[in-house]
Amino acid sequence: MPAATRARKLKLAVWKFASCDGCQLSLLDCEDELLALAERVRIANFLEASRATVRGPYDLSLVEGSITTPHDAARIQEVRQASRYLVTIGACAAAGGIQALRNFRDVKEFTSIVYATPAYISTLDRSTPIAAHVRVDFELRGCPVNKAQLIEVVSALLNGHSPHTPAHPVCVECKRRGTVCVMVARSVPCLGPITHAGCGAICPAYGRGCYGCFGPSESPNIASLAAQWIAAGATRSAIVRVLRAFNAAAEPFAAASKAYEDDQG
Amino acid sequence: MARSALEDMFRAIQALGYEIVGPTIRDGAIVYAELKGADDLPIGWTDVQGPGSYRLERRADGAVFGFAVGPHSVKKYLLPPSLRLWRATRDSRGAISVEAGTENPRKLAVFGLRSCELHAIAIQDKVLAAGAHPDAHYASQRQHLLLVAVNCMTAGATCFCTSMRTGPRATHGYDLALTELVGERSHEFVIEFGSGTGMRVMEGVPHRVAGDAQIAAAGEVTRRTAAAMGRGLETDGIKELLYANLENSRWDEVASRCLACTNCTMVCPTCFCTSVEDRVELGGSVAERVRMWDSCHTMDFSHLHGGSVRGSIKARYRQWLTHKLASWIDQFGSSGCVGCGRCITWCPAGIDITEEAAAIRATDLRKRRMVAANES
Ligand code: SF4
Ligand code: SF4
Ligand code: SF4
């Protein structure tokens, strides 16, 4: 690794946009690694952990959340300008998050139902990923992110290698851990075959189908998986619902959910 | 040997210093895991298998081995899903030391292996343990195995070992082979010795020399199983058939169903592909290389400079099937398929290797070319 980075601590900032804070908390969750991290990283802005903030520029910005307001759309530009590397963390930042369900409806209808005085609400029609606004150096998937992958990305930057976060399906991780396939053995609908790996296939290990937290895998064959579910008794509206979760706006999940919605056979 | 002596057999194997693994029920399937005693076996259970479907059911006869193969195979012990190959540490003065990550082999007795699986081990031996560069972990673990085979009393609906000439009767490669005889009033095992170690196990177990009737009954068990084989695969000229049909439109059809999920390769007892991942600890002074199961169905697996050379699901499925049934023959001198049916049962899309091979044969492009030539 370059001597310069070794001598100088990496200046890290964590930013929050529209999100639940869960991904930031994954960083605090890295108890075993926090000390090693503190040795190599200076946390300059991380409001979940400390109110002390340091002015930019930053070597690495971790960005959580999606863009849902005009104010945030402007703020992300500032973050980009102040950051050498910008890494997004989590499904909100990579795909718009659960709040991107608005993208399929008229947001004004929602605000009029939810808020007493909708006129005070300044919000965009759509929840969009960070990459729709600024250049992103790396996207870390997941709802929430996997803490080992989070450490891997920071470590990769510190140690000068590319991060290892494979885009193959969850089934790979599921089979490596020896789990009995819930689709085959119990006809439980599982999104594993079309979902990006990274979680370690937690849900099937507890007898549940994968919820698709990490979004689409490298080559998802949604039509074939949906056909299997329909053969096992699922309705088309059930397929729309499972595709519309934390990664509802990620392609090709979004296009597929629209197609199944339009064609409610 | 009487059914009641099965427990003695477990104790005798353990007394020789072996840990015992074998079939047991977990999460609705018969998997391979540690067995403390004979009671951990799936006694009185059977499996009902089909393309993309697996269910356990009770049997009326209390048979100990009345099922076919499950999602696991010996592969998980010989070629573990994840294995650290080495670990390097840099000390404060910058000196680097490397330690091998390979664990010491365990003395492992695998109980209840089927004939197809013995053939799969023989295939993996050829790939991983023979030649100029044997896989160190595989080769050493392989020498510490005790293999107790069972001749199949039922064939799964996805089994086709008779087509691949790999079963259902175990002919070699075992230390002991059992045939279970479940009668109206008797329940016993006919045992065949395959090695000196196998004989030593039986020294401590009550048994007597089998009579002609018992030997005949044991032969009848596997004859019945062979006659009840769930599926078949025509292997005649299959290599030439597949090589001549790389452009067959059937590959497009199967690609529309294939999820590229890798399940078929993960459960296959002969698939051996792995990739390595280098990990560096945050501090930058410890690095390790880990080898993990990988699959020709992922994009990364054929990633060369600039991208994946098998970018489509069609290209990846075709690669898998033609390697398994055709180019394996050129590469290792035998088919890469032992007809165990795992890839059929555990494919979430229910894709069936025998059906795909038959569909290619039915639409053989060479035949069409001949017809076209005759017509012109
Ligand atoms: S349980 Fe889900 S993730 Fe696991 S192998 Fe089956 S389909 Fe894939
Ligand atoms: S290709 Fe399928 S049937 Fe053949 S050995 Fe592998 S898993 Fe078994
Ligand atoms: S053939 Fe079946 S198990 Fe294999 S990759 Fe395709 S869908 Fe998955």
Image: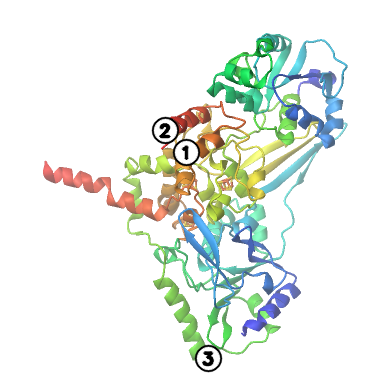
Q: CA distance from mark 3 to mark 1?
A: 62 Å
* Residue B86 sits above or below residue A157 on the image: below
Q: Which is nearer the N-term, disc 2 or disc 1?
A: 1
Q: CA distance from mark 2 to mark 3?
A: 68 Å
* Residue A26 sits above or below residue B104 on the image: above
Mark 1 sits on what residue?
A: A236
**For numbered disc 2, what is the local secondary structure?**
loop
User: Left or right of A117: which side holds B311?
Assistant: left
Residue at the spot 67% in from the left edge and 74% down from the top edge: B38
Mark 1 sits near ligand 1, with its Cβ under 8 Å away: no
From this viewpoint, is residue B282 visible? yes
Mark 2 sits on what residue?
A: A263
Residue type of the residue flagged with mark 3:
Gly
Mark whose residue sits in front, 3 or 1? 1
Q: Does mark 1 fall on the same chain as mark 2?
A: yes
Position in image of residue B67 (x %, y %):
54, 68
Q: CA distance from mark 2 to mark 1?
A: 8 Å
Q: How dense is the environment of label 2, judged by Cα within 10 Å: few (below 14), some, or many (20 and up)?
A: few
Residue at the spot 42% in from the left edge and 64% down from the top edge: B230
Q: Does mark 3 fall on the same chain as mark 2?
A: no
**For numbered disc 3, what is the local secondary structure?**
loop
Circle 2 chain: A
Q: How dense is the environment of label 3, judged by Cα within 10 Å: few (below 14), some, or many (20 and up)?
A: few
Of B67 and B325, the residue lying toward us? B67
Mark 3 sits on what residue?
A: B211
Pointers 2 and 1 in contact (CB under 8 A)? yes
Position in image of residue B207 (x %, y %):
64, 87
Circle 3 chain: B
